Amino acid sequence: MATQRILDFLATRRPDGPCLVVDLDVVRENYQAFEKALPDSRIYYAVKANPAPEILRLLASLGSSFDTASVAEIEMALNAGASPDRISYGNTIKKERDIARAFALGIRLFAVDSVEEVEKIARAAPGSRVFCRVLTDGAGAEWPLSRKFGCVPVMAVDVLRCAKALGLDAYGVSFHVGSQQTNLSAWDEALGDARFVFQTLAEEGITLRMVNMGGGFPTRYLRDVPSAQAYGHAIFEALKKHFGNRLPETIIEPGRGMVGNAGVIKSEVVLISKKSANDDVRWIYLDIGKFGGLAETMDEAIRYPLVTPRDGDETAPCVLAGPTCDSADVLYEKTPYPMPVSLTIGDEVLIMGTGAYTTTYASVAFNGFEPLKAYVI
Ligand SMILES: *Cc1c(COP(=O)(O)O)cnc(C)c1O
């Protein structure tokens, strides 16, 4: 999965210390695959997945819009060349003064999941478009988003009715089926909920127009995942099932699926040891761990493929851990990771599929370790 360009970069530049290398060609291919799979949906790249300016500039030039969660992310998208009408403020939890700053920057599209948030937007961003996020159960997702965002569909009706009453444009409904969602039917149930909100409000004379179908599109880690085309097909069928021939405008917000497979982290084995002489599980300590950018190994949720110079040699299950002095800095222990028995201190380990949710999760200087360096090529 490491592209030749990434391997050549590492071989010629030999950067010291752990680092992420992102290949923009892969990001471009991913963008084009989404465009092809869902030709009628607008793509709002979820900036949080990887906000590197080179990635944002490329996507802006390809015509992408941007899903942002803070004023800083809005500014990054603007600096990358996106006009304000291509940016949504998609976080349902915003300070009123940040809403006002976004409004001043030209942003007119906001996410909500409560009447309380609608009231803030009505005051700070009058007349803007709002969409209400509905809860999903996240079943089937490897990184579910739980109950933190969204409300039940019946409440979404109240939220959007309130938006309309306060002079906002009640624009639509959003959901997120959970990140790394490999169950293609996850969108079907959520689209059924969206349809309920559309229909209930239509009976009151409020016409919603947009469904934001969120992210959730996967990166291939150790197991195969369905293609963008397969997602597009399943989603289109579900849209037709629930909305018939009156299809709403649709948006998708891929994050992981846009950049995950475009990046590789180069790391190094710092120590290989055992806890007792007759222990048969070796501990392998890398120079990157949970605090260096691999936060998604929390609860061993995301299992990254690893490439070593000893691949092909006999393997044995190992515990993998990071270099810091926090005992939580263990990547894989409950399910040990098979690693070559011949692996040696100083060997380079490539961590694949790490283009999303790594650099921005790295701590500032825990134990004095620098944040993860990134090269975008
Ligand atoms: C994080 C996020 C996304 C991106 O999710 P992925 O699973 O990485 O595609 C999309 N929309 C919203 C609102 C998000 O918070």
Image (cartoon, rainbow, N blue to C red):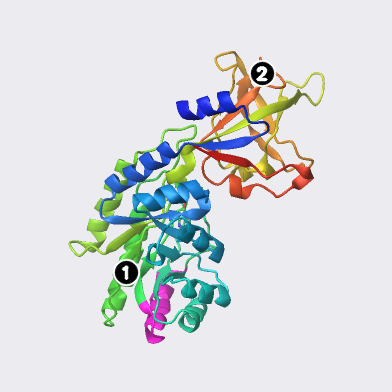
The answer, for residue 255, to whether it is visible in the render is no
**Going by the picture, which residue comes out furthest to the right?**
276
Q: Give x and y (percent) for residue 2.
A: 49, 29
Residue 354 lies, with reference to residue 82, above or below; the image says above
Kindly tell me whether residue 106 is visible in this rendering. yes
Q: Is residue 354 above or below residue 309?
A: below
Q: Mark 2 near mark 1, Cβ–Cβ under 8 Å?
A: no
Q: Which residues are magenta?
A: 151-169
**Residue at 46% from the left image edge and 82% from the top image edge:** 122
* Residue 292 on image: x %, y %: 67, 42
> Which residue is located at x 43 percent, y 82 percent?
126
Few, some or many residues within 10 Å of mark 1 (<14, 14–19, 20+)? some
Q: Residue 196 shows which numbered tag?
A: 1
Q: Is residue 307 left or right of residue 169?
A: right
Q: Amino acid at mark 1?
A: Phe
Residue hosting label 2: 343
Distance, label 2 to label 1, CA atoms, is 56 Å
Residue 149 on the magenta segment: no
Q: Quadrant of residue 110?
A: bottom left
State how many labels appear: 2
Q: Position of residue 373 (x, y in %)?
A: 63, 41
Label 2 neighbour load within 10 Å: few <14, some 14-19, many 20+: some
- Residue 164 forms part of the magenta stretch: yes
Q: Residue at x 28, y 54 (%)?
A: 238
Residue at image location 48% in from the left, 58% down from the top:
79
- Residue type, numbered disc 2: Leu
Question: Is residue 185 rendered to the left or right of residue 107?
Answer: left
Q: Nearer the viewer, mark 2 or mark 1?
A: 2
